Amino acid sequence: MKRMDIKSHCPINFTLEVVGDPWSLLILRDIAFFEKNTFKDFLESSERITTNILTNRLFMLEKNGILTKEPHPTDLRSSLYTLTKKGHGLIPLLIAMVKWGTKHDPHSTGHAYKNSFQEFKKNQAC
């Protein structure tokens, strides 16, 4: 389970404390770039997150004001997760990570999505 207290108020540390684990960043990626928004959607990602870790990360992201959780309009057993304004503020960080990872990993899937991410970034500026 993730820590509940903050080690310091260094801005980098604060960001890492809120979203610095790989699973949280992958959930944010799935919401921001791949329009996934249900528990089931996140489970279907290729990284294969376990249900208990996914439950914990969704709870922590909601608790930290990064995501909101709403009842699904057509499936009463499911919820929809969406980015808050605070969560949308993390998109430039995610885009920077995509650029860095694509540049330094010759096998990165980012190469296939290069134009999509540029278009996404352009649309976010509006």
Image: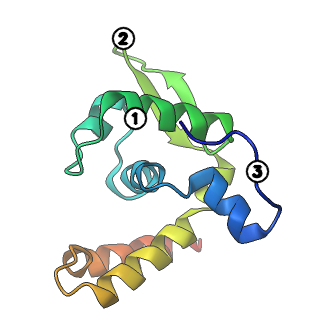
Viewer-proximal residue among 53 and 124: 53
Q: Where residue 77 sits in the image (x, y, percent)?
A: 36, 11
Measure the C-alpha gap from mark 1 to mark 3.
21 Å
The quadrant in which residue 59 appears is top right
Q: Name the residue under label 3.
A: 6
Q: Name the residue under label 2.
A: 77
The quadrant in which residue 42 appears is top left
Which secondary structure lies at badge 3?
A: loop
57 relative to 50 in the view: left or right: right
Residue at the far right: name it: 9
**Label 2 crowd (10 A; few <14 / some 14-19 / many >=20):** few
- Type of the residue with mark 2: Arg
- Type of the residue with mark 1: Leu
The quadrant in which residue 38 appears is top left
**Label 3 crowd (10 A; few <14 / some 14-19 / many >=20):** few
Residue at x 54% of width, y 64% of height? 91
Q: Mark 1 points at which residue?
A: 54
Colour scheme of this structure image? rainbow
Residue at x 57% of width, y 54% of height? 19
Which secondary structure lies at badge 2?
A: loop
Viewer-side label of 2, 1:
1
Q: Identify whether 53 is placed above or below 5.
A: above
